[in-house]
Image: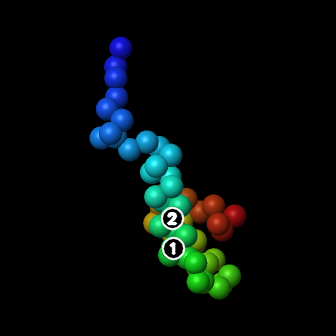
Amino acid sequence: MRTKNKQTEKSTIETLREIREKVSSETQNMTFEQLQKYIQEKLKETIHPTINWQEQ
């Protein structure tokens, strides 16, 4: 049986909270148009470049 050292490993929940807080702080004073552009840029960074799902 494996045991995990909870003090040294980040939990998934902690990681998701950190990501959420980072995005929230980056977007807190954006207008709707700025937010749309931000999301599109982030999607371009994370989605495989050959996927053309936005153009369909």
**Image quadrant containing the N terminus:** top left
Q: CA distance from mark 2 to mark 1?
A: 6 Å
- Secondary structure, mark 1, is helix
Q: Which residue is mark 1?
A: 25
**47 in relation to 55, above or below:** above
**50 in relation to 35, above or below:** above
**31 in relation to 13, above or below:** below
- 12 sits to left or right of 5: right
Does any portion of residue 41 appear in the rendered image? no
Residue 13 appears at what percent x and percent y? Answer: 50, 46
Q: Few, some or many C-alpha atoms within 10 Å of disc 2 (few <14, some 14-19, many ≥20)? A: few
At 53% across and 61% down in the image, what residue appears? 20
Residues at discs 2 and 1 in contact (Cβ within 8 Å)? yes
**Image quadrant containing the C terminus:** bottom right
Outermost residue, front side: 7
Residue closest to the eye, 12 or 47: 12
Report the disc number at residue 49: none
Q: Few, some or many C-alpha atoms within 10 Å of disc 1 (few <14, some 14-19, many ≥20)? A: few
Residue 3 appears at what percent x and percent y? Answer: 34, 23
**52 in relation to 33, above or below:** above
Does any portion of residue 3 appear in the rendered image? yes
At 36% across and 35% down in the image, what residue appears? 6
Callout count: 2
Residue closest to the eye, 52 or 23: 23
Residue 54 appears at what percent x and percent y? Answer: 64, 66
- Secondary structure, mark 2, is helix
- 38 sits to left or right of 5: right
Report the disc number at residue 21: 2
Residue 51 appears at what percent x and percent y? Answer: 55, 59
Q: Amino acid at mark 2?
A: Glu
Q: Amino acid at mark 1?
A: Ser
At 63% across and 61% down in the image, what residue appears? 53
